[in-house]
Image: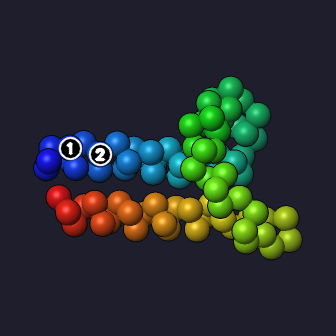
Amino acid sequence: MLIFLTIAYYALLVYFYIMVIYILLSWTPIKNTRFYYLLDKIVNPYLRIFSGWIVISNIDFTPMLGLLLYQFVLSVIARAI
């Protein structure tokens, strides 16, 4: 069981970093590349859940909410390991 939790933790941690990279790249001109499109396909299923909840003057702050919730889940798994 401990091995499964460890593998799950590291897989979720990699996904967390992919989400951070996706969000940071969304503020750059790289947003129009195939690499960004690939990241969008990977990350969007999770971040789409939070889309449009906190929008202030055309800036969507919900990815931060999604990352905070995700980080909380990671910390719970890390404490279980």
Label 2 sits on residue: 8
In this orientation, which residue lies closer to the viewer: 6 or 17? 6
Residue 25 is left or right of residue 29, and the answer is left
User: Which quadrant of the figure contains the C terminus?
Assistant: bottom left
In this orientation, which residue lies closer to the viewer: 62 or 33? 62
The residue under label 2 is which amino acid type? Ala
Give the Cα separation between the discs numbered 1 and 2.
6 Å
Q: Position of residue 73 (x, y in %)?
A: 38, 63
Please tell me which residue is depicted at 40% across the width and 68% down the height of the picture.
72
Q: Residue 80, relative to residue 28: is it above or below?
A: below
Q: Name the disc covering residue 39, or none.
A: none
Please tell me which residue is depicted at 32% across the width and 65% down the height of the picture.
75
Residue at the extreme left of the image, as rendered: 2
Q: Position of residue 33 (x, y in %)?
A: 71, 29
Residue at the extreme right of the image, as rendered: 57
Assess whether mark 2 and mark 1 are in contact (beta carbons under 8 angstroms). yes
Q: How was this image coloured?
A: rainbow
Q: In which quarter of the image is residue 64?
A: bottom right
Q: Quadrant of residue 29?
A: top right
Q: Where is residue 30 in the image (x, y as percent from the top left)?
A: 70, 37
Neighbour tally class for label 1: few under 14, some 14-19, many 20 plus, Cα within 10 Å? few
Residue 30 is left or right of residue 14, and the answer is right
In this orientation, which residue lies closer to the viewer: 16 or 27? 16
Label 1 sits on residue: 4
Residue 1 is left or right of residue 12, and the answer is left
Residue at the extreme front of the image, as rendered: 1
Q: Residue 51, relative to residue 26: is it above or below?
A: below
Neighbour tally class for label 2: few under 14, some 14-19, many 20 plus, Cα within 10 Å? some
Please tell me which residue is depicted at 80% across the width and 73% down the height of the picture.
56
Q: Residue 37, relative to residue 25: is it above or below?
A: above
The answer to whether one can see residue 24 in this image is no
